[in-house]
Every structure is written in C-alpha cells, then in structure tokens.
Image: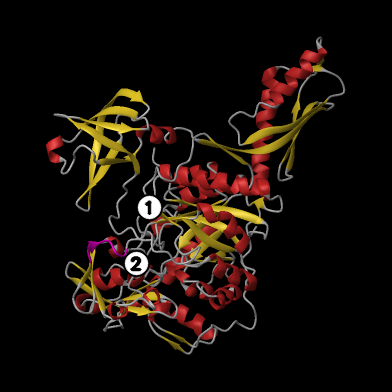
Amino acid sequence: MSLLAHQLELLSPAKTAEIGREAILHGADAVYIGGPAFGARHNASNTLEDIAGLVEFAHRYRARIFVTMNTILHDAELETAEQQIRQLYDAGVDALIVQDMAMFELDLPPIQLHASTQCDIRTVEKAKFLSQVGFSQLVLARELTIEQIKAIRAEVDTPLEYFIHGALCVAFSGQCYISHADTGRSANRGDCSQACRLPYTLSDGQGRVVAYEKHLLSMKDNDQSRNLEALVDAGIRSFKIEGRYKDMGYVKNITAHYRLLLDEILERRPELARASSGRTQVMFTPDVDKNFHRGHTDYFAQGRQQTIGAFDSPKYVGVELGTVARIGGDNFDLVTNSPMANGDGLNYMHKRETVGIQANTVQKLSEDEDGQRWRVFPNEGLATLPGLKVGTVIHRNRDHQWEAALNKKSSDRKVRADLRLEDTAEGLRLTVTDEDGITTTTEASLALQPAQQADQALAGLRTNVAKLGNTMFEAGAIEVALSQPWFVPASAINGLRRDAIAAQEAARLAAWQRPERAQPVEPPAAYPDTQLSYLANVYNEKARAFYRKHGVQLIAAAYESHEEPGEVSLMITKHCLRFSFNLCPKQAKGVQGVQGQVRAEPMTLVSGDETYTLKFDCKPCEMHVMGAMKPGILNSPPPSAIPYSPLVFHRQRPRA
C-alpha cells in the first residue's frame, strides 16, 4: 500500500541486498537500492535475483523496496530501461525513484513512480504539478525550510519524503553540471566527480583573497535528529537517510538511531503509526558521531545559518578523544575520558591537513579525576607524524570496539503473533494470528493420549508453542484450548509449531498488496511554465513529448546534449559564500565601511586550472557558479549508455 496520512516511514539506503536486510532488521520501513543500471550511483548496482530476495524478505515485515532509476536517459537507452523496469516489477519491487519524465511516456507495468530529489521540488507549484501527473511520492529538495514544507503539504496530498541524514550536495539536486563541464562525467547520469569537495580560493572583484585553499563548496552532513517532530508536523511522512555508497556499519547505526527517535514520537502520539510491522530491538547504543561525517548541520530546515560549511576538510575527523601528554621514542601518552582499543583510528589537524594515526596497540596506564592515561604505540613512526606534540588534540575516527559490536548481530525485529492450540478428531490444530490480522491454521495428525500429570502437560504445551526462537515472530497471547489435557511428545508439538510459522510467513507474503501507481489527472495538468531551459534536464524525445503534452512550448536540450557552448550556471546553490564570509549586502545594511566591500564583484573561485565566476541572485537568495564546458567535451558525442549485457537482467544463480 501507499503511505497513509498517519503513517511514518523510515527509509534507509542499501548498497547491497545484504545491507538492505540489515536495514530492515534495524528498523527501516522501506529500503532504496540500485538496480542493474540507470541509478545515480554507478558503483551501487545489484542483480535482479538479489533484489527479488530482498523484496521477499522486506514484504514479510510489510516493508517496501524502492529501486533507483534516477538518471536522465538517452534515446538509445529507453528500450533497455523499459525492459529493466518490467523485470523489476516481476521481481516484486514496490516503486521506482526516477528523474526522467520519459517514464510517463513508456509502456510500463503499473509500478509506482516516486519523484527523485533530482526533480528539484522547491515550490508549491512544482509539487502540485508532479503530484497531478502520476507520481506516488515526492522527494522534496533538501534546502526547504520547515515552513516551506508546510506550505507544500497544505496544497498537495501526495506523500512527502525528505532527507534527514547523510552527505549533502551543495547544489540543488539535478542542478549541478560542473562535473560534466570539466570532466565529461555527468552527475545527472550517476557519475559525479565531486568537484564540490575540492579546495578553492575565493577572490573578490579587485583580486583580494577572501579565502585561500578552503573547501568552500563542501557542506557538513545533514542531521535532522532535533527536527524530526517538527518535520512530522510539517507533513513529512517518509524520512530518508542518504548513503547508497555507505557500508554496513553506517546503515545499521544511522537506521537504529532514527528508529529509536521515531519510536519515541510514536509512543507519545498514538494518532501516528509505523509504516511497517514489528518491533525493533537494538542491541547497541547508536551514535551518529561514530560513522564518517563532516560535521553536523540541519542545513536550511530552521532557516539560513552560517555554520553549514565544512570548509577546513571534507574528511572525517571523528570524535574528540583527548590530548597528547607525553611523546616517547615509539609511543605517546594520551589523556582521555574514553576507553581505547588496539586498532583504533586516530587523527589530528596540522596546517589545514588531517594527519591519520593507526593505533597498533594501546595500554592503559592510570585513571584519576583528570581522566584515563593511555600509552599509544602507532603503526607509523613518530618522526613521520608532522606537528605531533604535547597538547595536540587527538580525535578518533575509528572506534575498534564499537565497530566490533556492529559486526555481530546488533538488532532484531519481531512481529507479534497470538497462538491458539486446539485438539481435533485427528490430532492438533495450531492457529496463528499476527499483529496485522493475518491468520493461518495448521493441523497435525496425532494419536492423542490422556496426560497422567495434567498441569505439567498443559504447562509444557504452552511453553513449547511459545518457543518462536529465531523466527520473525514473538509470542503474544498463548491459548491452549483442549477438550482435556493430552500428552504430546515435544517433537510433535515442535514440528506443528514449525509448520505453522512457515505457513504464517507464506500467508504474509501472499497477502501483501503492491501499492498502486497514482493516476494522472485529466485533462493533463499544465506545467507551471511554458519554457524550459537546459536546467530541466530533457535528454530524450519521450521527455519532450511529456512536457509538450503538459503545455510547454519551448524546450531546451539537457546540458549533456552539448548545446550550451558559452558560460552558464554550472551549479545553483542555496549556499552563499558572500553570506559565509559576512559580505552579504543584507548583513552589511547599515554597517559603516562594509557596503563598498560587498559590491566588489564579480567574485571568483579557483581550483587548480579551473576558474569560475560567482553570481548572486538575492531575491531567492541563491548563488550561481558560472562556467563553460571544455571544448573537448563540447565537441564530443553526448553520452549514452555503456552497452549493458542482456545477461545482467536475468536472474543469476549465486556463486557457490
């Protein structure tokens, strides 16, 4: 089913089907994963067989599986994309996350389509249009404030999805072309070169350096932990975690973190409900600081802030651990309030650079009111560690003991099931009714004998019926409704219970109803504008036909079509460097001696051999990074798909 108005969905990423299963066990109500092709993460693809297995696992918990097909498609790719979609539908996938409007012009099975973040949904008008053309869920722009989300919710009934955690692209999603202009690698086709993580020098119109060799386009990581309930009240119903390149530990930790937060909200607010079944029990203490991050920001959720940038380093510094108290020949002493372990990853900052240390072995020396004193023997020679001295602040970016806990079974998820045992003329009957109201009855033919010790026999039957062990169920009410106490061998009742649980799992799968795709309104809704620039990412004739049907008269080709030879906006972002360095005219209004500085434009960004001009659109409060496509790329054929072998699309047997 689609999300209902009172349901909250925790949506987790999965690089692989194995990670997807763990996401569900750690509390995800839905998982998004890459298919064989056409996902916006080239190195996160999965076979149909693996996806089909994940679908079956998820549906037992009433969790949904979404597959990302959110690249823009070349005309030569449409037939292959259509073939893949049909195979994903046959594999049981619940929805596709897409960017290309050509999807509405293809001959597709009735699978749900979700509007990807690359659709750049920032306005009420855009959200209304996409909800009217047949999208079943809308992924809103990360840059929206809570008040803007409320405004969209007031006008749109389609379920709204919002990123609550993970890495942030500095540009509006779908509105970044720097990678393609400089390298030929298109972000809209899943191959971003991440120019935003490079160091840049910022200069004003008079050549004065405002910032030197800083990571000026690198954002801290998104963290909406403190805003969850405000987002619920604003109308968000699907809470999305970024990270289809992330490892198992990240997905376990961050999913569990938000599961606990959402469960706390659900506990207080009975008018809301979880979007899937079961109860999640986490066996470790989630900590968002333990995984890779560049610092935390809630971005624009509560309005513009100056602290959203990770300008010093795009690397993971980790959690502050302590300070160096002594330097020895092959070791140093560290004073900290946290226990350490062999294999911990440490680092410190030296002249803008992060210096990493691998703690080969550690020894606890003492503990007093000032903290614990540990002796660290690093893998690296101390002479090779620049700037390490007494007083240096050390961070830990790999907590060996904590990660070891995550490498084990770290969560469980159980669906409540009530069980009723009855006798029949032929033997015994076990009825299972789970929390979703699904009921199965399983019978076993047995020659029943009266029990000599009635109370003991009944207690034994009750105990054995309730032994659900490693199954997906936990026992709720247990009812033993026998005409008289019978003696039943433990092996017989155990066999009946196993058969009953297998039947219940099969019934849950059989009862799953795949969500239906939303139907477009008739007559076709009019697009909010009659003209589209290259920013609309129209890369094929099917997408052109879609927009024409919805009233657009002039349609420019996507940037990847190589029809934009001059300087254009290569990146449009809500992040503003003038604001970050207190050079915004609004900041300077009325401040004596500053007005002239903020007019010192154009400002430029330089990284290596690349120079970009910055333009500032103050009315919507946006920054444009201007540049031109390199001639060699401009004169090359527009990119189309690497030929995918048909074998990719067939279900492959797992390797032995």
Estimate the x, y position of residue 249 in percent, counting from the top left. 42, 42
Q: Residue at x 53, y 87 (%)?
A: 551
Residue at far top of view: 452
Indicate the quadrant containing the C terminus: top left, top right, bottom left or bottom right: top left
302 up-or-down from 552: above or below: above
Residue 370, labelled with which disc?
none
Out of 389 and 650, give the one closest to the viewer. 389
Residue 410, image x, y percentages? 49, 35
Image quarter where the N terminus lies is: bottom right
Report which quarter residue 338 is drawn in: top left
Q: Residue at x 64, y 83 (%)?
A: 523
Membership of 212 in magenta stretch:
yes
Q: Which residue is mark 2?
A: 580
Q: Mark 2 or 1, which is nearer the eye?
A: 2
Q: Amino acid at mark 1?
A: Gly
| Residue in view at x 34 percent, y 67 percent | 580
The amino acid marked with disc number 2 is Ser
The part of the image, by quadrant, that contains residue 558 is bottom left
Is residue 31 inside the magenta stretch?
Answer: no
- Residue 349 coordinates in the image, percent (x, y): 24, 47
Secondary element under disc 2, as helix, strand or loop, is helix
Q: What's the magenta region?
A: 211-217
Q: Nearer the viewer, residue 23 or 562?
A: 23
Q: Is residue 188 above or below residue 561?
A: above
